[in-house]
Structure formats: C-alpha cells, structure tokens
Image: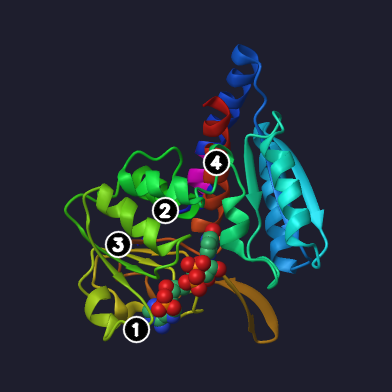
Amino acid sequence: MKILSGNEVSKVRRQKISEEVQQLKSKKGVHPGLAVVLVGEDPASQVYVRNKGKACEQVGIQSYEYKMSADTSANDLKLLIEKLNNDDRVHGILVQLPLPKHLNSDEVLSWINPRKDPDALTVENMGLCWKGIARVTPCTPSGVMKILEHYKISVEGKYAVVIGRSNIVGKPMAHLLQEANATVTICHSRTNNLQEYTQRADIVVVAAGKPLMLGREDFKSGAVVVDVGIHRIEVNGQSKLCGDVRFDELDGWVNAATPVPGGVGPMTITMLLENTLKLASL
Ligand code: NDP
C-alpha cells in the first residue's frame, strides 16, 4: 500500500510558496499577510491557530493574530473584520471555526470581503467555485486534490465516493472531484447501506467525523482511501490522533491511503498559505 503523505506533499509545495512569496515581495513590493481571528479559548482551535501562524512564518507570509474573548459581541467582531477588510497589509482573513454559540458563523463569514477569503467560505467564493471559475478553492478539499495529483493518482473516469456533505469539506470535495472528471456519489448520515457505495468506489474520501468508522471490509481491493477525519482518542490510557478510517487494516488490501496524522491535515494549512499568496498576488 502506498502511503499518501501530506507532510511530503506539503514540504514540496511550501518550498514553492516560499519562493513565490519572495518574488512577490521583490518584484511587486507586496508582502502577503494573513489575519487569523480566534474567538474564545477552545484548545483545539488554539492549536490550529498557532500552527497556522508558524506555517505562515515558515514561508514568509506575515501573520496577524487576533484573540477575542468567548463573550465577544457580534458587533465587536464585525468591527474587527471590517478593520481587516480595509487593512492593506492583510490579504486573507480567517475566522477560526467553530465560533461560540451566540455568534452565527454564516453571518460572520458574510462580513469578510470575498477578495480576502482564503478559506473560500463566503457565498461569493462558493458560487464562483461551483461555477468553475474559482478565485480560490476551499483548503481541505483542494489539499486532497493536490495529494492525488502529487502521487499521480488519476481521477478521470473513476468512481469516487465522498462521505460527508458539509460546506467546508464534503460538498466542495465532491465538486472538485467531478470537475476532475470523476463520477461522484455523496454519502451522509441518512445514506442507506453505506458499504454498498464504498465497496464499489475507486476513490473514497472519508469526512464523516466519526473516529475509526471504516476499515478494510468497507473498501474494494485496490481502492484509494483519503481520510479527512481527525480525532484525539484514548488508547490504553494514552492519548493519540486517529482518523475516520482504521488505517492499520488497510495494508495489503487498498492501493493507497492517507495516514492520520500526516495526511490531509498538513495539506489544509498548505492550501491556506497557497490561497493567501494567490489573493495577495491578485
Ligand atoms: P461535519 O460534522 O460538518 O460533517 C460530517 C458529515 O458526515 C455530515 O455530512 C454527516 O451527515 C456525515 N456523517 C456523519 N456520520 C455519518 C455516518 N455514520 N455515515 C455517513 N455519513 C456520516 O464535519 P466536517 O465536514 O467539518 O469535518 C469532517 C471531519 O473532518 C471531522 O473529523 C473534522 O475534524 C475533520 N476535518 C479535518 C480537516 C483536516 O484538515 N484534516 C479539516 C476539516 C475537517 P449529515 O449531513 O447527514 O449529518
């Protein structure tokens, strides 16, 4: 089984991003900047925000962090986003999700200038993406496509199954796969007999958010399995990361699979950097 290493692909792409950031700075005098807004103290979000900051630093993108308390009002958050929309140093604004319950994430995302939306989560960017004329495409699904590209896994004509239909992962994932000429089925929690779909698929992208949900028996021999899920679980009193797939069962059965950690996760951040650079150069 080939291990599809997001770490490996990220390394190659981040090197390229770093070179392009330098070029943009020296030729056009533009220093790409990403503002990350964190509301509240969710520990996982704090780690994600820290990692995004570090990744920016690594490739020469300026990162600006804004930490707001969990009880921040919608109005205060809106004022900050408007300030960032008007700040020429900032080319991408990322509001870390999930937000505290009193804030409506759809409303908050609508305040971001679509030209500064590296996550492609504003309605305008989603629409452009669905029309096939994307300014930038959503980070996690784009990261998956880049992994497949890097390992020369052809998508055209293949039968792909995506498990999950969220706006952030499942739906845009299915869209990008069909744009690359796969025949795609989206499965979700109300799908009857999930295995009937996954066992026929050449490519399965799992984004159900259920730890260790699928194993060897769910895939056909020779399939390609991409695991988007990421969870912290306890095993024999020790904390470890796992995905939606029981990765250890796959060797000798499927053709290729992404591990967790080190699969899709690092690519999501890499695509965030790539999208920020793209918005800065636009
Ligand atoms: P959501 O919870 O928004 O969506 C989960 C989707 O999976 C829903 O569409 C749901 O169906 C479907 N689902 C849930 N249970 C089942 C089941 N038993 N069978 C089939 N479908 C099921 O999650 P996200 O899309 O935001 O994220 C998915 C996972 O990916 C999470 O573990 C998340 O942490 C991870 N993630 C990882 C990233 C990375 O960089 N590696 C980035 C983003 C997310 P329904 O619509 O019917 O409820």
Q: Secondary structure at mark 1?
A: loop
Q: Position of residue 38 (x, y in %)?
A: 74, 57
As drawn, 182 above or below 104:
above
**Quarter of image, res 104:** bottom right
3 or 4: tag closer to the N-terminus: 4
The three-letter code of the residue at mark 2 reads Val
Q: Secondary structure at mark 3?
A: loop
The three-letter code of the residue at mark 1 reads Arg
Residue located 64% across and 44% down the image = 93
Label tally? 4
Q: Report if the CB atoms under discs 3 and 4 are less than 8 Å apart.
A: no
As drawn, 21 above or below 162:
above
3 or 1: tag closer to the N-terminus: 1
> Crowding near pointer 2: few (<14 within 10 Å), some, many (20+)?
many
For the residue with label 1, is its CB less than 8 Å from the closest atom of ligand 1? yes
The answer to whether residue 245 is visible is no
As drawn, 177 above or below 185:
above
Residue topped by disc 1: 190
**Quarter of image, res 48:** bottom right
Residue topped by disc 2: 144
Q: Which mark is residue 278?
A: none
The answer to whether residue 14 is visible is yes
The three-letter code of the residue at mark 4 reads Lys
Q: Position of residue 106 (x, y in %)?
A: 56, 61
Measured Cα–Cα span from mark 2 to mark 4: 15 Å
